[in-house]
Image: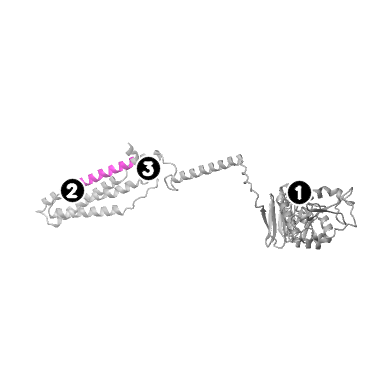
């Protein structure tokens, strides 16, 4: 036996649901001793007198007669006490019932002997008041194998804890006011107790997700299921196995330690529509393109700055020619001059090629010794470090002029040294016969010392950087 819980009213799209209901009712008739073609008995229950709910009862009966013509349909109109919902008259304090209630109303005997039961829609409170006294008979009916087909309120009333109505919870709106069912505050009432889970119909129209989440989170319900219109939740009695039928959606709400877990389920044979294409906004696309272009430009500029030569502390502009000419002579020295200076210094220690006697040889050694001392003095002088500047045209011209001047001074120094050597040799040969060996050597050393002093003076004059103004002239 199964419960067929429909989330809306009678719908031609639920033909499969109606067929399965009739098939189970026929099976129940066979178990009672009749065949599938035998005359069965189906109860159709609606709220309200026949003049108000007659059309509704006729539509429900059509489900049976169109599929099982031999079946006997028994309509039951609930008009007893508490079945008529209140409708506000001129004043909210003066409610007026929808229909006149019958205090002598009673359900037909043998309610638990029907082969199936169909319960229509309306107010949940009307079905609780009308069927509540016969809850034991209805439980016996479904446990015996008779199927239950409930529409809207007829599905919601089967729960142990049924949502009677309401759209606020603790003063906070949790559902549209259309879901009030005549009650403002959310009201949970005792249902017929046939199904453990609480069901809620018309979920796609009433958008009751917030209501059920608040009820489960607040502890009013342990679990709940919301059913769309045109959708049926089939629950097998005993096993509790569920199946979604129809084209709508069924949504489950379960209590969790950290909140409420929501799970959606659709029918197995329902085709899933493709996801809609997300909208495209031209304005946002243009803004994104402009942002990317600006970022790319900034990246390129940063790369160009990183590729430029020079160090962080180097001046951005080159010094002018006039500034280079006015700078001190020491500041005009460049690394090339510093590299050329040690090469020119050894030229002062050139050895004489002419042969001389012992006296001349002594003079030669003296001159050579003085040259070595001069070379050591020049090597001890610390080289000046030029500022890290870019070489201008004036600086290059000054360097060339200084190199030429140093070369000429070196040449003059060599010539002077050779002449002094020859003069010393002649003097030594003339005085060798009349003077002792010590006197010519002493005179020779004095002469060589004077010559060396003259050479040093010439060397200092030649090695000094030339005046930039003279170099340019």
Does residue 106 appear in the picture of this structure?
yes
Report the span colored magenta: 397-421
Q: Going from the N terminus, do you reach mark 3 or mark 2 first?
A: 3
Q: Mark 2: which secondary structure?
A: helix
Q: Main secondary structure of the magenta part?
A: helix
Q: Is residue 118 above or below residue 279?
A: below
Q: Based on the displayed image, in which of its 4 quarters is residue 139 positioned?
A: bottom right
**Residue under circle 3?**
391
Compared across the picture, whether 299 is left or right of 173 comes to left
At which x and y percent is residue 292? 54, 43
Image quarter of the N terminus: bottom right
At which x and y percent is residue 171? 79, 55
Frontmost residue, 12 versus 22: 22
Q: Going from the N terminus, do you reach mark 3 or mark 1 first?
A: 1
**Residue under circle 2?**
420
**Residue under circle 1?**
66
Q: Going from the N terminus, do you reach mark 2 or mark 1 first?
A: 1
Q: Mark 1: which secondary structure?
A: loop
The verdict on residue 441 being magenta is no
- Crowding at label 3, few (<14), some or many (≥20) Cα neighbours within 10 Å? few
Does residue 184 appear in the picture of this structure?
no
Q: Mark 3: which secondary structure?
A: loop
Q: Based on the displayed image, in which of its 4 quarters is residue 403 positioned?
A: top left
Frontmost residue, 316 versus 160: 160
Q: CA distance from mark 3 to mark 1?
A: 109 Å
Residue farthest left in this picture:
433
Determine which of the numbered discs, if any, sits on residue 328 in the image: none
Q: CA distance from mark 2 to mark 1?
A: 148 Å
At which x and y percent is residue 6? 74, 53
């Amino acid at each position: 036996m199964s419960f067929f819980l429909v989330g809306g009213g009678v719908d031609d799209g639920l033909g499969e649901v109606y067929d399965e209901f009739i098939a189970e009712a026929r099976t129940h008739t066979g178990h009672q001793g009749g065949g599938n073609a035998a005359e069965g008995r189906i109860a159709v229950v609606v709220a309200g007198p026949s003049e108000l709910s007659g059309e509704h009862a006729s539509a429900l009966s059509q489900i049976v007669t169109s599929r099982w013509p031999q079946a006997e349909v028994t309509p039951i109109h609930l008009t007893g006490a508490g079945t008529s919902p209140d409708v506000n008259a001129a004043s909210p304090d003066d409610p007026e019932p929808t229909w006149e209630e019958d205090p002598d109303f009673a359900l037909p005997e043998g309610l638990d002997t029907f082969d199936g039961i169909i319960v229509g829609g309306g107010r949940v409170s009307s079905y609780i008041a009308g069927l509540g006294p016969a809850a034991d008979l209805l439980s016996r009916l479904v446990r015996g194998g008779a199927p239950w087909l409930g529409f809207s309120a007829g599905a919601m009333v089967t729960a142990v804890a049924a949502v009677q109505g309401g759209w606020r919870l603790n003063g906070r709106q949790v559902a549209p006011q259309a879901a009030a069912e005549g009650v403002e505050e959310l009201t949970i009432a005792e249902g017929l107790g046939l199904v453990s889970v609480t069901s809620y119909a018309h979920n796609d129209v009433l958008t009751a997700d917030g209501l059920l989440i608040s009820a489960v989170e607040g502890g009013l319900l342990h679990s709940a299921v919301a059913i769309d219109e045109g959708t049926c939740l089939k629950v097998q009695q005993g096993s509790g196995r569920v199946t979604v039928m129809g084209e709508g959606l069924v949504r489950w709400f379960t209590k969790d330690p950290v909140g409420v877990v929501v799970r959606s389920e659709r029918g197995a044979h329902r085709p899933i529509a493709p996801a809609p294409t997300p909208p495209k906004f031209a304005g946002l696309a243009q803004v994104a393109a402009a942002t990317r272009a600006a970022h790319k430009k900034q990246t390129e500029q940063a790369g160009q700055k990183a590729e430029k030569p020079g160090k962080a502390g180097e001046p951005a502009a080159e010094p002018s020619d006039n500034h280079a000419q006015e700078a001190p002579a020491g500041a005009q020295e460049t690394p090339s001059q510093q590299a050329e200076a040690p090469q020119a210094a050894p030229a002062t220690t050139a050895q004489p090629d002419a042969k001389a006697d012992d006296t001349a040889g002594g003079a030669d050694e003296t001159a050579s010794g003085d040259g070595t001392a001069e070379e050591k003095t020049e090597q001890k002088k610390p080289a000046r470090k030029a500022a890290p500047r870019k070489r201008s045209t004036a600086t290059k011209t000054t360097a060339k002029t200084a190199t030429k001047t140093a070369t000429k001074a070196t040449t003059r120094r060599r010539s002077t040294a050779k002449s002094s050597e020859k003069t010393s040799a002649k003097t030594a040969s003339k005085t060798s016969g009349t003077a002792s060996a010590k006197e010519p050597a002493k005179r020779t050393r004095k002469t060589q010392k004077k010559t060396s002093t003259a050479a040093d003076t010439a060397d200092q004059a030649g090695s000094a950087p030339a005046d930039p103004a003279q170099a340019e002239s």
